[in-house]
Amino acid sequence: MEALAHPRQRRKEARPAELTAAALELFVEKGFAGTRLEDVALRAGVSKGTLYLYFDSKEALFKAVIQEGIIPVLEAGAGMVDSFTGSSANLLRGVILEWWKRIGATSLAGVPKLMISEAGNFPELANYYNDTVIIRGRELLRRILKRGLTSGEFRAIDVETGIDVIFAPVLMMLVWRYSLGACGCGSHDPASYLNTHLDLVLNGLARERSA
Amino acid sequence: MEALAHPRQRRKEARPAELTAAALELFVEKGFAGTRLEDVALRAGVSKGTLYLYFDSKEALFKAVIQEGIIPVLEAGAGMVDSFTGSSANLLRGVILEWWKRIGATSLAGVPKLMISEAGNFPELANYYNDTVIIRGRELLRRILKRGLTSGEFRAIDVETGIDVIFAPVLMMLVWRYSLGACGCGSHDPASYLNTHLDLVLNGLARERSA
Amino acid sequence: MEALAHPRQRRKEARPAELTAAALELFVEKGFAGTRLEDVALRAGVSKGTLYLYFDSKEALFKAVIQEGIIPVLEAGAGMVDSFTGSSANLLRGVILEWWKRIGATSLAGVPKLMISEAGNFPELANYYNDTVIIRGRELLRRILKRGLTSGEFRAIDVETGIDVIFAPVLMMLVWRYSLGACGCGSHDPASYLNTHLDLVLNGLARERSA
Amino acid sequence: MEALAHPRQRRKEARPAELTAAALELFVEKGFAGTRLEDVALRAGVSKGTLYLYFDSKEALFKAVIQEGIIPVLEAGAGMVDSFTGSSANLLRGVILEWWKRIGATSLAGVPKLMISEAGNFPELANYYNDTVIIRGRELLRRILKRGLTSGEFRAIDVETGIDVIFAPVLMMLVWRYSLGACGCGSHDPASYLNTHLDLVLNGLARERSA
DNA sequence: CATGAATGAGTGTTCATTCAT
DNA sequence: AATGAATGAACACTCATTCAT
């Protein structure tokens, strides 16, 4: 229709996303310094020069990859905590599973491992990521834990360290998938893994033994 | 005595370790491709050429860094499991705290983060690391979990996924320290973090509520 | 009339001249290799592709710039020499001032500096320029000097070197204007400069002291 | 002797000068943008990478070429004016011929043409060149002209424009040699050219007809 | 053993040129 | 005729590796 009438135009709008998608894959796999722009271009089906029509430099491309991978992250989650009426255990379970559906099971899954691997080379970007993603994510979990503590549903634990302890296995699943997990080293079915994690954590948190 | 008698000799024998130590720091910080051998040499206080007296290539240096980082902690752990007579909860706690003392709190702490970041570029080395470290580490935890299950101390959980879920927060603490944690993004005191983790996990595992 | 009736047509015919004018400015300022065709197009208010509708290549554009800059000033000068009836001093003064009016004070002034800067990269074009402009310009001055020598108005000097010595300051004024003069380095008012030059040269040439 | 004992050392000290010499030739011939660093290296008999052991960038090399070409310029001249006891005409002749011997007839001869061609691309360097070379050179000629005016040897002329008018032919000879003169277009024997120039100028300046 | 000057293959980046629209 | 997205050859610059000293 409209789109087919202007394939060149449609292409031009889609290009940046195609390029960052290709770049994300290669950055995750080989690291920033180990990725050749020619390979990024090749994977996106364009020539090396075309990259520079959309990104000023390799570094600009990297930043775009991270920032584009961040925006959708922010939309998820916060609303859920506000409106949830069930138990805090179910809220925690829901938020983690939602995060999995929106991040872990999508093409954005590689972003956290990428940011972790390259933080040392891009400290300002790491700070931006921290401010934009990490602090807000921690705040989400903090509210959930405090909700459960206030209601008496959860045992008394240290909230601040608890936040990171609880999220670590979820994050590690992604990190693993794109590192040793991609090298034939054993990794698990995400559903079972998350199941076990939630089972352990929710039992660990619960004041009363759950069913 | 011997050492003081032949300081030149001692230096010569210590060189490879000084070089891999310098290399480890930089590889962890900047990644393999992002690290310049000149910087490694500089940090070790030798010239660029000297590196090649001890390592055939940058890749050989990387492999040495990883392999040197695989020390026989696992043997110590295995012995502990064999001989331990207390509760499985205390065994798990002991093994994790021991790992922390022998790896997490030493200069070897960067190795797991490095292997995770570079696995994609060194698949054979990743496999070697998997066989030497990961599989054996998992076996250690597997024995502990099965011990607790057999004795009835632990609730029925899926052992295989449980192993990784339980170890993930410990690993993530290291990964974090050398990535975003090094960029001014908030990270925790290891002791408190491990405390919370063990508190949650052991409560999550326990059939009976612990004290 | 014709022009106003077909503005599109007029534009089309004016394009090449607009393009070479823009190109001349940039070539003079940045040199041939240092000039980007995109900037030429931008300055002429067209797109990069449009350049190629009028010129086959960057080199063709350069040649057009030079050739277009070679206007029939020399014919006018030659006619002046043929028909002049006053003193040879006044003829020399008249020819140089005419050259100034027709070249030095117009948009063509950059051409000599450009040809001088790029002769090494375009030897055939330099030869063409030599044949078309330099040799004929020298011939003009040669005739004037010989006229003054024959009539006894000028002292005996070496004609061949005298030609170039006499024209050098005029040429240098242009060269300077488009190089260091454009960088805030001091340069003179052309009229005073030419005045001093003619004063010196004509006094230097004159057998008798002039008034 | 010493030198032959440390050929590597001697080479290292000589390298920068060898490189700037090669670069000067090519910059003069092809311009800054048109010169490939590989060709500079080739002409100096080294590899591309070696250039970067001595100069940070192409631009740094360019600046070194100009600045190295400046230092010897400054040494010449000034002392001569202070101590000269003969006529101002002979002083002017002496200074110009000295300039020729020290610059025009040496490997530095290409520097002025280079600076003229590239001033537009390196405005700060042009300003430095102006401050360091041009202003001081003009001051030299200014003192000579004023000396002749004060003594009554020279006719009244405008000193400021006279300075540049008088030096223009000398400068143009160099410029010409490295542009059209190098393309088979006619150029003159420097000695004859300078002779004619001095003959014309000194006669143009003299109040009394010289012998 | 140790050095660091030298190398050259490799990669990021630019830009003249093409061509589908 | 005019556009500007796309191309790819060319070049500046880096850095692992070598080797004469």
Image (cartoon, coloured by chain):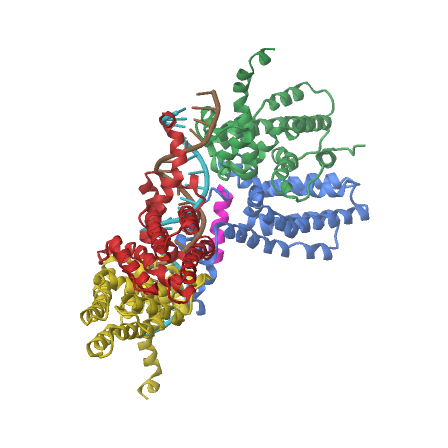
Chain colours: A blue, B green, C yellow, D red, E brown, F cyan
Is residue A17 shown above or below A34?
Answer: below
Residue A109 visible, this angle: yes
Does residue C14 appear to the left or right of A122 in the view shown?
A: left
Please tell me which residue is depicted at 81% across the width and 32% down the height of the picture. B211
Furthest-bottom residue in this view: C1
Q: Which one is nearer the viewer's eye here, C21 or A120?
A: C21
| Residue C178 horizontal/vertical position (percent) | 39, 64
Q: Which one is nearer the viewer's eye here, C194 or A12?
A: C194
For residue D206, what is the image quadrant? bottom left
Please tell me which residue is depicted at 34% across the width and 80% down the height of the picture. C8
| Residue B204 horizontal/vertical position (percent) | 72, 36
Give the dominant element type of the magenta stretch: helix, strand or loop: helix
For residue C69, what is the image quadrant? bottom left
- Residue A19 forms part of the magenta stretch: yes
| Residue A112 horizontal/vertical position (percent) | 58, 46
Q: Which quadrant of the rendered structure holds the N terminus of chain C?
A: bottom left
For residue E18, what is the image quadrant? bottom left
Residue B131 visible, this angle: no
Q: Which one is nearer the viewer's eye here, D49 or D78?
A: D78
| Residue C146 horizontal/vertical position (percent) | 19, 68
Q: Which one is nearer the viewer's eye here, D131 or B56?
A: D131
- Residue A23 forms part of the magenta stretch: yes
- Magenta extent: A16-30
Is residue B195 shown above or below C209?
Answer: above
Furthest-left residue in this view: C150
Is residue B49 shown above or below A128?
Answer: above
Q: Which quadrant of the rendered structure holds the C terminus of chain C?
A: bottom left
Does residue C79 appear to the left or right of D62 in the view shown?
A: left
Q: How many marks?
A: 0
